[in-house]
Amino acid sequence: MNGTLVQQLVDGLAALMLLTSFALLAQHRMISVLHWFAGQGLLLAVTAAIVAYGTGSDELYISAIMTLLLKGLLLPWLLWRVIRQLQVHREVEPLLNSSLTMLIALGVTLFSFHMIQPIEKISQLITRDSMAIATACVLLGMLMMITRRKAITQVIGFLAVENSLFFAAIGSTNGMPLVVEIGIAFDVLIAALIFGLFFFQIRTTFDSLEVEAMNAHLIHKDDDE
Amino acid sequence: MNLFVATLLAPLLGGVLLAVIKDPQRAAVFNIATGIVTFAVSLLLALEVLDTRAVDAMNGWFHLDAYNVFLVVLTTFVSMTTSIFSMPYMRHELETGRVDLPRLRLYHSMFQLFQFGMLLGFTTNNIGVLWVSLELATLATVLLVSLYRTPASIAAAWKYFILCGMGIALALFGTVLVFFTSSAILGHGNIALSWTALYAHASELDPAVMSIAFCFLMVGYGTKVGLAPMHAWLPDAHGEGPTPVSAVLSGLLLNLALYALVRCKMLVDGSTGTDMAGAIMMGFGLLSLFVAALSLHRQRDIKRMFSFSSIEHMGLMTFAFGIGTQLSTFAALLHMTVHSLVKSGIFFTAGHAAQAMGTQKMAEIRGLIQHQPGIGWGLLIGVAAIAGFPPFGIFTSEFLLFTAALESCAWTTLPLLLGLLIAMAGLFRFVQPMVYGEPPATATSVHVNMVPVYIHFGLALLPGIAIPLFLADWYQQAATLITMSAIAGGGGG
């Protein structure tokens, strides 16, 4: 199999991955955040399939199918149902100083490329250039969790981090062993179900999905009286 | 290795069955029975492993050595006593309407699944599966923390979920990096994540990658250990969840995270040959000790106060593992054991105290000794033990820790001493008025079962008075195992 073609494809997909991470950070309509998240899941499945083709590993084909079902279809569908039921799908989330966030995101990306340099030097795998991008995506997902105020977008940030970790695994190591992969997928699924459960509890208890409303119940614990 | 299979299966089956047992009384009894069976089987397993030193089970998927088998026994023991404690405690919560029947069923089921996740994490030989099981145990406890469905408990559970999910994602990234370098040496497959194989080839792993990986693993697992400054979730989760959950979170789950961190440190030491990992752990340990000791003074809630004391002790252990000499590792393992026993005992007592007074606010808990002497004395003795007063095991382990610190980096004894003093002052400042004086008129008498508490404190006395020979030998074995890689790599301490 033509190694350079696979490598170029994976590099291209890595660039798209970075694009989706930035898009997730910049979107403020709930439904578009969800669309980008679903797109990221599909991108992951395609990457896994291409690397599987390049390396001829059966395990990766299985994890590509698993990714497609879980991250491309099931999770976005679950989240879509939840926001439909909670009637927040049209809601717009005001972003705090979005130009500053973008600048920070840029800095984070540069930092990842710098940090990962010693690792890239020694890699002999066909997909070595994607490592820095995967690191950047992990950090961007975290940035999304920090800057968002709604519980649902925080969770999407969390799942985006999980996606980037998966990308790091296929991009830099041709995928983790299948047992671990299945274990992680299982954990993510349970986590998503618990998150879904929480949305409804938070909504009924606090009458809003703003994280601030929740923290108000905790912060004053130390300092009351 | 049938004993091993039984140790893992007992809590798993118990958890599944408890999900369908509707009668609360029967479920509580079955919960205790599961705990006793698991403990008995794990004890037999430990004796077997002690004879043969290290055992691989099920084609190398699981690995048992002196280090993890003692933690397995500790976990099953504390789970067993917690299930005994939780029977009257949860009955009281049911009667006062804080939980309803379906949620009580969820509690029993998740409690055993949590134990299963813990045991899987301790015994697995695959660092990927170790990550998965730590996440599993976390997810089980998230549901337990939000059990009361009060606004504060839901907020606490959310915070716990998000922060630990975040932390643990970083640890997964570290694991991916380890796999990245190991798959080049060991081949692409499960073997490249198998801890025994990694340990045997530690010197061949790329030091640059392992250093970066350790930073992620440190922050990731460190979040779960509750090290400052990533500790924000811990007091909320401990304060808002049911008391049996606070007891196992503090006494057990933090241990698993620290266990994972130390296993990773062993690999990094072998790869880099420097004491970089140890130095980072010492730094985090000292910082946690100070942050916790100072925050302790600002608390109003009894369970939050003791959760800060947990952060303090996890900091001490991380520091001790960080020094990386045989003696300090011995001290850390001993401290881990005694802290688990004493802290879960304290949480049992604090839970009963809060039930008797009808509040968790320390300002409203008064005169416990006069009101219900069992609870009052239990709390006083527990705090004396956790503060490190001589007849108890914590004194021994802290003394050993100081000796080890004096040998390798003497200047650290001063901040250590200062941190411990501040924490001790904080503990007694709050506990003194709670146990002495007149009880308020609103206090009610609750049905308590202090037997598990006294068993815990009694066992904690043992290493303080005369440490049994087999136990010392056991710790010695584990300490040798943990420090070996640092010595082989030429660094350490």
Image: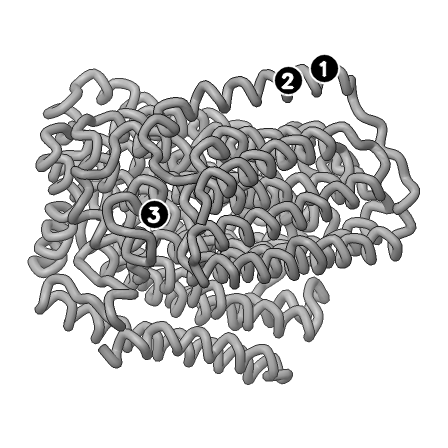
Q: Callout 2: residue from which chain?
A: A
Q: CA distance from mark 2 to mark 1?
A: 6 Å
Q: CA distance from mark 1 to mark 3?
A: 37 Å
Q: Where residue A114 appears, x then y in whole percent?
A: 45, 19
Q: Which residue is mark 2?
A: A104
- Asked where in the image residue B450 lies, by quadrant, the reply is bottom left
Label 1, secondary structure: give it: helix
Q: Nearer the viewer, residue B258 or B35?
A: B258
Q: Amino acid at mark 3?
A: Ala
Q: Is residue A182 left or right of residue B489?
A: right
> Residue at coordinates 42% horizontally, 28% vertically from top-left?
B293
Vertical order, B321 against A98 (above or below): below
Q: In the depicted view, which residue is nearer to us: A191 or A118?
A: A118
Percent of width and height locating residue B207 = 25, 30
Checking the image for residue B260, the label placed there is: 3
**Relative to B56, B156 lies left or right:** right
Say whether marks 2 and 3 touch (CB < 8 Å): no
User: Where's residue B238, x and y in %?
Assistant: 54, 47
- Categorize mark 2 by other alpha carbons within 10 Å: few (<14), some (14-19), many (20+): some
Name the residue at 82% across, 58% down.
Answer: A81
Q: Nearer the viewer, mark 2 or mark 3?
A: 2
Chain for numbered disc 1 = A
The residue carrying pointer 1 sits among few (fewer than 14), some (14 to 19) or many (20 or more) residues within 10 Å by Cα, namely few
Residue pictured at 74% horizontal, 48% vertical: B151
Mark linked to residue A100: 1
Residue B256 placement, left or right of A204: left
Q: Looking at the picture, does residue B117 appear above or below residue B332?
A: below
